[in-house]
Every structure is written in structure tokens, then in C-alpha cells.
Image (cartoon, coloured by chain):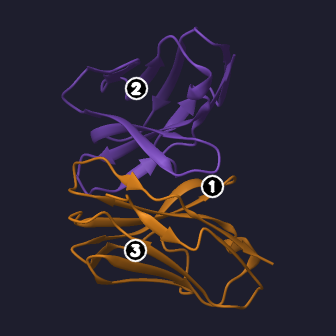
Amino acid sequence: SQQGEEDPQALSIQEGENATMNCSYKTSINNLQWYRQNSGRGLVHLILIRSNEREKHSGRLRVTLDTSKKSSSLLITASRAADTASYFCATDRSSNTGKLIFGQGTTLQVKP
Amino acid sequence: DAGVIQSPRHEVTEMGQEVTLRCKPISGHDYLFWYRQTMMRGLELLIYFNNNVPIDDSGMPEDRFSAKMPNASFSTLKIQPSEPRDSAVYFCASSPGLDNEQFFGPGTRLTVL
């Protein structure tokens, strides 16, 4: 079964707007990671947030983690057409096996 | 570094044929992962290796699937015999450690007719 579930499944915005994607998970985690996948390509790591962290930033990306609610959000500010991709959250369970469980992803379309 | 290298990029085969997918991880990475991605099931972990040793193969769908890592720079995923339901994109990823990001290859798109 999927550990992470992204919401929404699809998101369409205009260039310059902010995009927020959410991820919920079921079990305790060691860390949570966000990846991007452009159509027909492999996944690219965006950001890793550990279970004892609440917020991380990387450029235009902001990730929050709420372990009490078992949820995370990815915010992309000032979106660009090049941000059009699918975004996945992946969790590494607290047993620290290194096994990442991926959600089904959010498809983001940024219109120029 | 060239990143994770996978070959072939595309494979079309007929049901019953043997398929071998290849992966070269990033040098120095101790962990190698094989994933399968389909529209229906999303991205699934099939198996992963640590220092060339298979650690968890619980995601391998059935005995038709096997994976090997004979050395630190090469791994194969074999399907024998292949079936149409094996059609998917297969990704290889490597990581320097358990608690690190994973670096994905470009994937192999497999079509079994």
C-alpha cells in the first residue's frame, strides 16, 4: 500500500503564482523527501526533511513537515513554466531501512 | 560524474522472451535500488542492494524477476519469461547512504507485446 498520498492529484496555475502540494503518510518516518519528474525522465531529488525538522528552504522551494498530523507540504513560489512536472513525496520509515515509499504524485502545470 | 546510467532506454519484446535491464550506479554509492513505475501502481521499489548484497527483495513481483549486482559498478534486472503486464518504466537509483537522497537514472521503458 502507498505510504504517501499527495493532494491534489493535479494542479494548474499561471506563471508567477505559488503552487502548494500536500503529502500525507501513515507510519512514523525517519525522513521525508520530495522529488520532481519531468515527462519521460527520471526523478530528481528536490529536498529532504528529517523527522526532527519542521521547515526547510531551497531556492524557491519551501517544505514543511508536521509529524503530529503525518503530513508535509511543498510550496513553489513564483512558479515558472519550467516547473511543469510531477512532484512526488517519499518517506523513509523510522526503522531507517533506506526504503523509500513513494506517493502517487501531483501533476503540476504552469501556464506561461 | 555521468550520473546513474541505464540501458537500454527502450526495449520492445514479445511475451515469453527474456529481458535484461542494466544499471551503472554513481561511483562511490553503496546503495542501489530498482523501481518500477506504472500508471496503475505508481513507483514501486522492487529490490535494493547494499555493497552489492541484496537487502530487501520483497517488492519483486514473482519468481520471473531476478536481480544481481556482481560488482559495485554494475547491476542487472532480469525478467524471464516476460509478460505484457511487465510493461512499465524501470528505474535504477543509487545513494551514498541510507539516510540520503537517491539519484535516479533515466529509466528503461519496457514494452512486452
Q: Which residue is mark 1?
A: B41
Residue A77: horizontal and vertical position, in percent?
Answer: 47, 12
Residue A90: horizontal and vertical position, in percent?
Answer: 41, 43
Q: Which residue is mark 2?
A: A72
Along the line of sight, which residue is nearer the eye, B75 or A4? B75
Along the line of sight, which residue is nearer the eye, A58 or A48? A58
At x 52%, y 23%, the residue is A21
Q: Is residue B59 above or below residue A14?
A: below
Q: Are marks 3 and 2 on the same chain?
A: no
Label drawn at residue B57 = 3
Identify which amino acid the numbered label 1 is placed on: Arg
- Look at the numbered disc 1 and give the secondary structure of its residue: loop
Q: Give how far apart the Cα atoms at labels 3 and 1 are.
A: 17 Å
Q: Give how far apart the Cα atoms at labels 3 and 2 are.
A: 28 Å
Q: Would residue B20 appear left or right of A45 to someone viewing this image?
A: right
Chain B colour as displayed: orange
Chain A colour as displayed: purple
